[in-house]
Amino acid sequence: MQWKRRRDQWLKQLPESDSLKIELYSNLSNAKLMEDCFYKELEFGTGGMRGLMGPGTNRLNIYTVRKAAYGLSMFIKDQGEQAMSRGIVIAYDSRYMSREFALEIAKTIGHQGIQVYLYEDLRPTPLLSFAVRHLRTFAGVMITASHNPPQYNGLKVYGEDGAQLPPEDADIVVDYVKQAESEFLIEVADHEQLVEEGLLTYIGDEVDQSYINALQTIQLNTTADKGDLSIVFTALHGTGTFPHNRHFPRSVLQMWYLLKNNAYRIPISLQLNLLIRKKQLHSN
């Protein structure tokens, strides 16, 4: 069976200390799980790819992420030197392994001589879309699995217009991904070397502030009295908390918060309910 051959190849290629290999060994007796991990390759579609994390070709891990990044880097190189120098910007959310996947993509794409901009900390998707346009990069990648359960992660690819990559371009990326013979043969650059050579640049506050400045130019009613306006804000699983707390102008909207230190753990419905009740008590 093909899935068994793939599994055996992974067991052979993975370093002994790799947590993915340890996880594989611990589940060898679960044939149904092993088949699901290896019966196909995780598909790269129009918006990118998303799936369960873990070992195998049908799982998201540093090796399948590198393979997807390789396909994207070949697509960018196809567009010429200008596209390579404009490069790519990468952002990531608060999901497990998001930071690690972002760095693997940066090292894979940077290895091809393509300029990489990487957020220094987690950021929500709208900031990635804005950064693509603000920095005039050729593409962008967001590490996220949106609303999916915590066992999932994924990556979304954006074009130079800040929107997700159109189908015709995504098909070209997919073709390059398929041309890569093995996830284990994808070369990656050294992180420190990329930084030293100027191919990897960390971004953060400056882009955030530019985003906030841009927001203030599109207010529909600039004469409204914002002192009496309050809204309920929740950062869902926390990704929006960092830029919001540091950069959102208090002069635009008055925000109400609940138990800031527990923002990642309180169910959203409870947050909203309690915040609304708090506001009502203040009004009375």
Image (cartoon, helix red, strand yellow):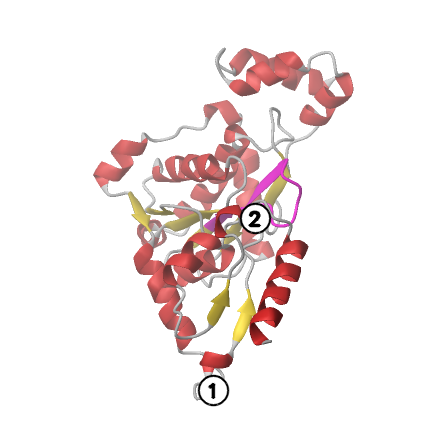
**Left or right side of 7 for 161:** left
Residue 10 visible in rendering: no
* Quadrant showing the N terminus: top right
Question: Quick check: marks 2 and 1 in contact, CB under 8 Å?
Answer: no
- What's under tag 2, amino acid-wise? His
Residue 248 magenta-drawn? no
Q: Nearer the viewer, residue 144 or 81?
A: 144
Q: Amino acid at mark 1?
A: Ala
Indicate the secondary structure of the residue bearing disc 2. loop
Q: Secondary structure at mark 1?
A: loop
In the rendered structure, find residue 224 and report the number of the disc placed on it: 1
Position of 170 relative to 232 (above/below) = above
Magenta residues (range): 141-155
Residue 231 spot, x, y in % from top left: 55, 70
> Left or right: where does residue 114 sit relative to residue 145?
left
Alpha carbon distance from label 2 to label 1? 32 Å
Q: Between residue 13 and residue 1, name the one nearer to us.
A: 13
Res. 224 visible in picture: yes
Looking at the image, which residue sits at the far left?
196
Given residues 250 and 92, the one toward you in this image is 250
Measured as percent of width and height from the top left, residue 259 is found at: 52, 52
- Mark 2, other Cα within 10 Å: few <14 / some 14–19 / many ≥20: some
Give the residue number, with chain letter if any, for mark 2.
237
Does 121 appear above or below 132? above
Q: Is residue 95 above or below residue 34?
A: below
Q: Residue at x 64, y 50 (%)?
A: 267
Residue 95: image quadrant is: top right
Label 2 vs 1, first from the N-terminus? 1
> Which quadrant holds residue 192?
top left
Identify the image quadrant of the C terminus: bottom right
